[in-house]
Amino acid sequence: MKFYLSAIILTLLCLTSFSQTEKNYSSLDPKNPIDFKGDHLIYQNKKIELGPYAFFIDGQLSDKDLENYKYVYNSINEAAKHLSDGTEDDPMVLYIAPYVYWIDNPDDPEIRLPKQVGGTPFGLEIDCEWLTFFGLNTNPENVVLACNRGQTMGSKGNFTMFNFSGDGTSVENVTFGNYCNIDLVFPLKPELNREKRGSAIVQAQLAFSRGDKIVARNTHFISRLNTGPFWGSKRTLFDHCHFESTDDALNGSAVYLDCTFEFYSGKPFGHTVGTGAVFLNCDITSFTRGEQYLIKGGGPITVVDCRMEADYTSYWGWKEKTPTEERHYQFNNKLNGVPVFIDSHHPYATVEMKDKNILNAYRFEYNGEVVYNTYNLLRGDDEWDPMNIKNLVEAAEKKNKQSYRDLPTQLKIQPTRVSIETGKETVLLSAQLLKFGNYEIKAENISWKVAPEYDKLVSLKPEENGTCEVIPTNENDETKEVVIVASTHEGLEAASVIYVKPAFLEAPKFSELPKIKMSANGKLNVTYKLDMRFEDQSLVSWYRCSDAAGKNPIEVQVSRFDSPNLEYTLTTADLGFYIMATVAPNHLRCKPGTPVATVFNKQISSADIHTKSNILQLELQTLSTKYQSAVLPGFWTLDCYAPEDTHFYDWEADTTKDAWYYGPGVNGASLDTGLVQATKGARLRYTPVGDSFGNMKVSFTACPSKTAGQGFSSARAQYMDVFIKFDTKTLAGYALRLIRTTKYHDAIDCVFMEYKNGNAKPISDAVSTSCYRTPCMITVEAKGNKLIAHAKTSAEYFVISNRPEVLLEMDLESTFNPNKFGGFGFQHTGTVGSGATLIKNLSIEWE
């Protein structure tokens, strides 16, 4: 009897506890009340039954409160441990009350590491089919899923809040926010506010997605660099969402409908994927200073009925340099209220869809209303219709007597950028028609053409299967660039660039073999005659050899840009060597012939040299950039190396290819030509001839690819050291280090380093400067016991006010222990391409 009485009392106590929690429950937002009933919710007059496929999450609930309820949690992370795969008709749903839910603990001092070397560190990985995050509030800013880590700021690698696996992921009425570089402000409960981790803009990402049929509605995606809203997803719809980002940020395989954007830099897409990204009826506000572009890499973009606002730029383009064969689509867009043609600098790249049937793939009118054709864009082969407009589309088709489904959005041609020789080769171009989402349909009725100016260079032979044979007919001497354009009757376009060569001739014969003569001014000249009528484009290379037979040759100079390098200026580095030249006969209508070598008839002596031994003015255009790891007096050592202080970031030097090249830069350095890193870790050292050196000065112009003053791709120990007073063999001496840090997104730090056995440590305070922009003129000097550096730029850029600690012109000075070394060099540990620095105007002086 006592047992039953105790059980009854216990049950009553539990019921009392349950009802007390439910009775006292109140969500944070009284304007959007949630009625929590223990086993169900009532929200907006709808009853939501909780169960194995419907969880309730509220961060206000204590762990003790949770003991009384099933399917109720106070964190996303705990709820994620109990998920079950949903279905398209019956998804797994997380009903989330207003609060800030930290997916990754911001107070944990541990650095987040990827599971695999070079991988991505994640806050939470979820493998679940048809999972929905539903915020129980009409304002997505009141339901925040948060983290605050990014590359080098709390993580090693580009920290990403979520990694989703599964089709059908859906989010509604929530904010995905990475608050690494922006403050979290939460008015509903100010105690949950949090300051950003740091001001420097680093890669701080939100969500990866390996899945199809991804939907976000009334959701905010907040970060800056690499925002990453469901990167990797296939068909993705963003409906009435808001995005804030800098570069490399947006999803490149998505439809953005009725969305708003804030762009804080010039290239919000790193690239788009397949059929690309579509903006429909969106509002875009740019805070970029200078020209606003949409994409950094490749891939198509379509912009329809969008309104762009910008106070600091009047030019909008697809990308900085849009390739000839690239095509993007637009219709009815305005910039600051005025109609705009996107990318007027490259008009061939923009297809204006007005009066073209292709517009129906994106929008049409029915009963006087505009309908955005998401059904056509997203239906794929399985009738996916997340906006539920199929019936409307069918009705419009009947009334307008026109099809609004299965309309392709992309025409592609392959190959492109190939060369064909007249009389010997042809190329077969293949057209591919794709519906949005990369669904291929049969390519029929493709039209092929070339501009009238190319008519005599090629003939086209179209086939019914969507192919076209291009037959070269170039009777000129020069190779010509020809653009082949394909189109559909609906208005899709694609292009291919073909280099059409004339019929090649045999390489010319020498009527006089090469020989080297010395002029009175300390220069060697190679002379020869070729039996030809063309301008000489022979490839002339110069070598230092150990004897008159040309043994042990080391290449030191080459020819570039179809200009034979006929003259070689002797320096003290040539003392004791025999100089050899090789000539590969060439002109514009042949392939280079077999090189013929000639060696100057005597060993170089001091009497032959007229240049000053204490000054090295470099002709970088002729410098050999062949991989050369030997450290020899008078020679350049060009190799690849991963310094000890970068090993934390798990990368290895690639010694299988040349580490440097001479040519044009990219992005911020695209208008310049010079010496550029070809691999991460590219290193260059010069070993002067002599045993002892005093004062020394290095001058050069740096042209960074990065345009915002940050210099390098990230703050992962990415820097460029400028060696001075350096022993190139033992790796001892000094350097000026230019390094990206987490302090600023538009400035680098400069600091003097001392090297011992290849390991470096700072010997000065670091100073920050925003002047590392193309062109940046830099000098580094060793004078007495002082190291002195100066840097400045002539570039015009926006200067943030009230920031005296960031210098517009950099001066740095430090004492050092003088040595007898005279070596010089560069060590670049940053990524290349968009993170490289072009170098020109290099000179070295010794005392």
Image: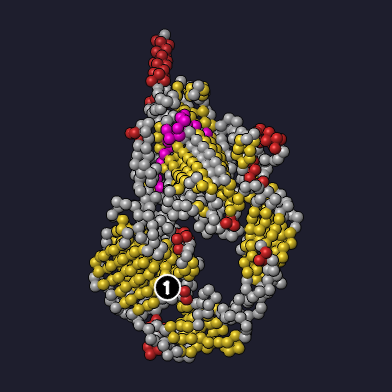
Amino acid found under the numbered disc labelled 1: Thr
- Residue nearest the viewer, comparing 409 with 87: 409
The percent coordinates of residue 194 (x first, y second) are 35, 39
Image: magenta residue range: 132-150
Q: Is residue 383 left or right of residue 194?
A: right
Q: Which quadrant: the N terminus?
A: top left
**Would you call the spot at circle 1 few (<14 residues within 10 Å), some (14-19), or many (20 or more)?**
many
Q: Which residue is label 1 attached to?
A: 637
Which secondary structure, mark 1?
A: strand
- Residue 326 picture quarter: bottom right
Which residue is located at x 65 percent, y 51 percent? 492
> Is 489 placed above or below 705 here?
above
> Is 477 placed above or below 514 here?
above
The percent coordinates of residue 309 (x first, y second) are 47, 46
The percent coordinates of residue 385 (x first, y second) are 62, 36
Which residue is located at x 64 percent, y 55 percent? 494
Q: Is residue 209 left or right of residue 781?
A: right
Residue extending farthest top: 1
Which residue is located at x 40 percent, y 83 percent? 571
